[in-house]
Image (tube, rainbow, N blue to C red):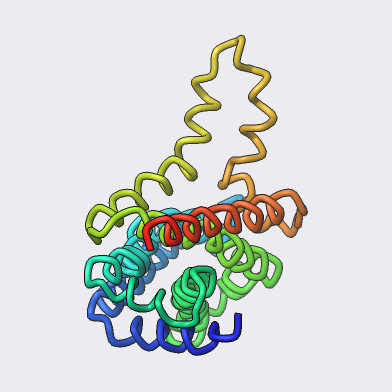
Amino acid sequence: MRHFGVLLRHELRALFIAPSTYIASVLFLLLMAYVYYMILESYIGAEHDVSVAETFFKIFWLPVFFMVPLLTMRSVAEDRRAGTLETLMTTPVTSLEVICSKFLAAWLFYVTLWGITLAFPFLVIYGMGRPGLTESLLDPGILIGGYGFVALSGLLFVAVGIFASSLTRNQLVAGMLSFSILFILIVGMPALEEHATAWELWLAEPLEFLKVFRHLEDFSRGMIDTRPIFYYLSNAGLVLGLAVLLIDSKA
């Protein structure tokens, strides 16, 4: 991994100069700000069992579905289409370094955008004059658990995007593949469990382990289980390994 640092700086620079990155960033922040505002409006003058922060994290899937494909769809597909990937592989770099640098750059950008949303509660408290919501907005346990879940699950989600991009030369196809796989991971597992027939009940426990929303709920409540951590880390490594194998096979 001697050239990993150079490749990572190159990928970060490419992300910051790509117009699609800024479009995705603006859309992400506008969408999240609007959602946060609507959540606040629903909480004013009404009693709720969960805090504003916990409700806010429950819509994590919304930016995942459009943000991750936009960040990753051009990572490998564009290089393959332009022929720069083949040229890069003739240099003393490995496919592992290439994939890991693209993955880490996209993940860091994804986590950074989520980190900006941490400013929302402070803007509400100090900018809009609503100090009464301080406890609901700035619960440290929920914020640490929620953002921890976002960062941890983002490893797998971004890895899926990189893998989808390595399957094709077309950015649009890569984005659609990434969206489809993410949809199955986040929404498909709970739906499969709900529609399981009696003879499929033996799958209940494994499917429960794969439910992303359950992981978020546990993290938000401060219940840090090692099983979700192992799930996201191991599967992110597996998906990235498959992407490396694809690069090697098509190089």
Q: Please, which residue is most extreme toward the top here? A: 199
Of residues 157 and 236, the one nearer the viewer is 236
The residue at the point 53 percent across, 62 percent down is 154
Q: Which percent across, then down, holds residue 98? A: 47, 73
Q: Quadrant of the C terminus?
A: bottom left
Position of 142 with respect to 62 (left or right) is right
Relative height, residue 234 to residue 190 (above, below): below
- Residue 127 appears anywhere in the view: yes
The residue at the point 29 percent across, 76 percent down is 84
Of residues 249 and 37, the one nearer the viewer is 249
- Residue 34 appears anywhere in the view: no
Of residues 36 and 118, the one nearer the viewer is 118
- The part of the image, by quadrant, that contains residue 32 is bottom left
Q: Which percent across, then down, holds residue 240? A: 53, 59
The residue at the point 37 percent across, 66 percent down is 72
Q: Quadrant of the N terminus?
A: bottom right
Position of 208 with respect to 27 (left or right) is right
The residue at the point 55 percent across, 27 percent down is 193
Q: Which percent across, then down, holds residue 238? A: 59, 53
- The part of the image, by quadrant, that contains residue 165 is bottom left
Q: How many labels were placed on the picture?
A: 0
Q: Which percent across, then down, holds residue 131? A: 55, 79
Of residues 36 and 126, the one nearer the viewer is 36
